[in-house]
Amino acid sequence: MKKYNLAVLVDNKPGVLTHVSGLISRRAFNIESISAGYTEEASVTRINIEVSVEDDRELDQVVNQLGKLIDVVKIVNLGKVDSIIRELVLLKVRANKKNLADIRNVVDIFRGKIVDVSPENVVIELTGSQGKIDAICEMLEEFEIIEIARTGTIALSRGPVPVKNM
């Protein structure tokens, strides 16, 4: 399976995210991550979808089916253009006075931030590639990860041309 990042611009209406995700899941394709949010235009929502498919033919099938939805304005495969792809994670890790310095060292190496401290745990914020986030999770396992919240991937193309003009 190969993962692809799609930027899908849709009309900002109730139920559009449900239609988009439902169409993909009904076709038995796996959504690895999905996020939606406002854009620079109030009438448009951007849905970032990371989808797993076997090959380019299946990807084309997903894109063609999405393109048939009435509320879809534009679809761009960000894997075909130079793009910046990131994910945000919040990690709650068991911590005490003895291991806090070690946890801080790991967080600093990954250029993360400790955003909350209590006597029993710390909350860490980190932005980066999926590989970077997977790596910090692996490093922090020895301290006991209590909870993880990941946003899934979001992406922007590099350069001056926005997705809506691609």
Image (cartoon, rainbow, N blue to C red):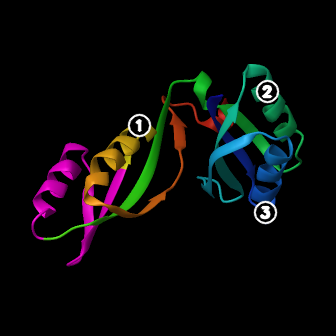
Q: Which residue is mark 2?
A: 58
Q: Which residue is mark 3?
A: 13
Is-magenta flag for residue 116? yes
Tell me the distance, in whole angstroms, between the alpha carbons under discs 2 and 1. Answer: 25 Å
Q: In the depicted view, which residue is nearer to us: 91 or 10? A: 91
Which part of the image, by quadrant, shows the C terminus? Answer: top right
Q: Amino acid at mark 3?
A: Lys
Q: Residue at x 71, y 42 (%)?
A: 30
Quadrant in which residue 92 is drawn: bottom left
The image's mark for residue 78 is none
Image-based side of 46 in relation to 62, left or right: left
Residue 72 in picture, x, y percent from top left: 80, 46
Number of other residues with Cα within 10 Å of mark 3, as a class: few under 14, some 14 to 19, many 20 or more: few
The image's mark for residue 131 is 1
Residue 97 in picture, x, y percent from top left: 11, 70
Tell me the distance, in whole angstroms, between the alpha carbons under discs 3 and 1. Answer: 34 Å
Q: Residue at x 46, y 47 (%)?
A: 87
Q: Earlier in the sequence, mark 2 or mark 3?
A: 3
> Dots 3 and 1: beta carbons under 8 Å?
no
Tag in front: 2 or 3: 2
Q: Earlier in the sequence, mark 2 or mark 1?
A: 2
